Amino acid sequence: MLSNPLQGHELPNSPLPSPLAVHWQHDPSVCFLNHGSFGACPTRVLQAQVRYRNRMEAEPIRFFVEDSWDLLDRARAALATFVGAHATDLVPIPNATIAVATVLHHLARTGFLGAGDEVLANDHEYPACLNNLRAVCAMVGAAPVIAPIPFPIRSADQAFDAIMSRVTPRTKAALISHVTSSSGLILPVERLVAALEARGVRTIIDGAHAIGMLPDLNLNTLNASYYTSNCHKWLCTPKGCAFLWIRGDLQHNFRPLVLSNFAEKPKPGRPPLHTEFDFVGTNDITPFLTIPDAIEFLSTLISGGIPALQSHNRAMTLRGRDAICTRLSIQPPAPDDTIGSICTLILPPHDPARRASLSTRPSAYHDALQDSLLSRWRIQVPIWSVADGPRTVRISAHAYNAPGQFEYLAAALEAELARERSSL
């Protein structure tokens, strides 16, 4: 047993991860419960990236001038099949934030968005995307409109109603996360896209967490205006791998933020969209090239393939949620049908100054409790708030996690919260 910081709070020994953790390169001394922030790339996929990089460095000129186009098309074809899309509608991009910024600047540059218009978002959106939304609105004189989504939340209907209640005749575009980052909610994007597009509102879906987490993702069926997702999260590619999907009727004059050599001289035989986005200057495209390798790896990780893995990860997330709720005597803030492989829980009230007084150095994290969980218990898990609300903990589960890790987190949280209350 671990040495207890307070009497009456017994902690189990530091738990082992899943046997499947051998496929990843995590520090074995850290209980890693934060796949949702930056993902984690399996060794086999990293090895595939090394092979692509070695090919690139062996003959850089031939790689970029000749080889890269077919390699990108191969990765794009695998991606298109996986997300239910036409390959012609997909372009590589480093991350979802850049994709959202690209769409917003396109709407401003082409005059679709201008003075007096409104762009709708909500207060659970990713901060960097909201920063770009506000910047573009300020540039053209448009107004960002932020719909508050309740948390705790009783049903997905509340999120739908909260967003739709802020639509006005001036609403030109709406930014909506498929899975919210801070609160871990699966939003009803199918209903929202249908309702908003019917009113002439262009929908920008930030699906950063969706690919690899949510089953049956089908972009053609969803039919938003724009959709982006990070492959380096739940699909487990290397960092810097994402895609942007642009609906076919909206691709005319759609351009990247940075124009390359091909901006005024399209490459023969390739769609202009691919010509410009596939080469935006000297860039390491090898993360995107590993998409087929990541899909193949995850498909063979457990019996039943990726659908079984998605169900496994979600079940473990709910089990971890229940372990924490039981230990801390708190209630789940969202119903099961809004939860995928990440889940956010509201912690009991606390005094931030008291928590800060327990730290020996300024915390590098949102909340000093996260620093204490890492330094004292070797647990990596985010502690923050949703829409400036009360303090929360967000857990993530992937194949390398084990139920005992979440039970260990629950016990550590109980001990740390008691430690806060005792520091008078």
Image (cartoon, helix red, strand yellow):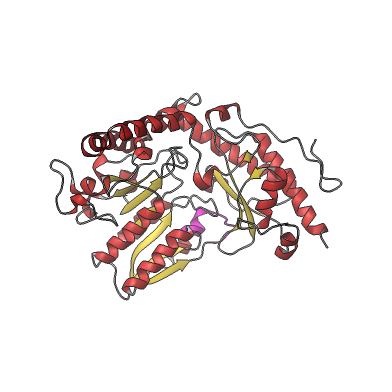
Out of 131 and 397, give the one closest to the viewer. 131
- On the image, the x and y values in percent for residue 220 come to 30, 44
* In the image, residue 372 above or below residue 200: above
Q: Quadrant where the C terminus lies?
A: bottom right
Q: Is residue 188 left or right of residue 410?
A: left
Can the viewer see residue 117 in this picture?
no
Out of 238 and 163, give the one closest to the viewer. 238
Q: Is residue 133 left or right of residue 152?
A: left
* In the image, residue 191 above or below residue 270: below
Query: Which residue shows up at 17% across the image and 42% down it?
Result: 270
Q: Is residue 180 left or right of residue 372?
A: left
Q: Quadrant where the N terminus lies?
A: top right
- On the image, the x and y values in percent for residue 372 come to 70, 51
Magenta segment: 150-160
Can the viewer see residue 147 in this picture?
yes
- On the image, the x and y values in percent for residue 253 come to 20, 57
- On the image, the x and y values in percent for residue 273 come to 22, 49
Query: Which residue shows up at 46% across the image and 32% down it?
Result: 307
Query: Which residue shows up at 51% across the image and 39% down it?
Result: 40
Q: Is residue 346 left or right of residue 9?
A: left
- Indicate whether residue 237 is drawn in magenta: no
Furthest-right residue in view? 7
